[in-house]
Amino acid sequence: MKNIILVGTLMVGKHTLGKRVAEILNVDFIDIDEFLTKKFQESEDYKAINTQKKFMNIIRNNPKSFFEKKYYPFLKEFKHDKSFIMVGSPELPLSFDNYYFLIGLGTIIYIKRDPDIILKQIQDNYPDEWKEKNAKNKDCALHDIRELLIFAFKDKEGFYQEIADFTIDNNDSIEEGVNKLANLIKKIWDENLKN
């Protein structure tokens, strides 16, 4: 069975669908960010940072450089003996090295979701304090979150579609998303057995 790597922007359902489908198909579920965070926290670079505040300032000032040079290099240390479904941060597959590492692990599936559905999910399920804090952090009014989501999608959507072997939309209920993903993975595995 081929391993499956789920990619997509924030709040498209990678974790929710991936975890449920891994249980249904009886394979391991891996959040690669947990592995990478643990490895980074064991590193000399992390030990050299004295405070949490200083650490967060380093990430905020140059996140691209931090993740590419300090965090993601640990990806190459990842090994797993059993079949798995893997998820990670939206930025994980965006670098050349990471992309080639991921395609060596398995099949990439892009999970996409309409920004308006994500916005409704934010409005329905998250406290006002969270929404206000995030709006302030992005230097925008709360009603501008929709524009930010659309920008994030347009910025990365083409790339995700380009690198993915398959794409599914997760615009319906969780159950429908789980069924779509499980059926697609079974189809991938069946095709793999035929070849």
Image (cartoon, rainbow, N blue to C red):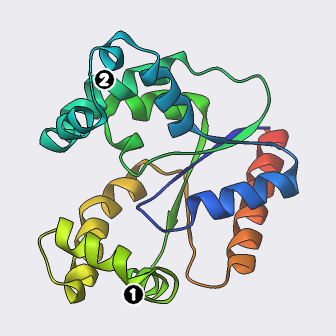
Q: Is residue 82 above or below residue 46?
A: below
Q: Nearer the viewer, residue 177 or 55?
A: 55
Q: Nearer the viewer, mark 1 or mark 2?
A: 2
Q: Is residue 164 above or below residue 67?
A: below
- Quarter in which the C terminus is drawn: top right
Please tell me which of labels 1 and 2 falls first in the chain.
2
Q: Which quadrant of the structure image shows residue 166?
A: bottom right
Q: Quadrant of residue 176?
A: bottom right
Q: Residue furthest front?
A: 51
Q: Quadrant of the N terminus?
A: top right
Determine the secondary structure under disc 2: helix
Verify CB contact (< 8 Å) between mark 1 and mark 2. no
- Asked which secondary structure carries label 1, the reply is helix
Instruction: Please state the horizontal and vertical placement of residue 89, each as a whole percent of the image.
Output: 44, 48
Q: Which residue is mark 1?
A: 116
Q: Position of residue 26 (x, y in %)?
A: 88, 47
Q: Report whether 45 appears left or right of 84.
A: left
Residue 48 lies, in percent from the top left, at 27, 14
- The percent position of residue 24, horizontal first and vertical second, equals 86, 58
Residue at left offset 25%, top offset 40%: 56
| Crowding near the residue tagged with mark 2, few <14, some 14–19, many ≥20 C-alpha atoms within 10 Å | some
The residue under label 2 is 70
Residue ID at (24%, 62%): 155
Residue 140 to residue 54: above or below: below
Q: Which mark is residue 57?
A: none
> Which is nearer the eye, 178 or 99?
178
For this view, does 72 lie left or right of residue 64? right
- Residue at 72 percent across and 55 percent down: it is 19
| Residue type, numbered disc 2 | Lys
Q: Is residue 193 left or right of residue 97?
A: right
Q: Residue 99: which quarter of the image?
A: top left
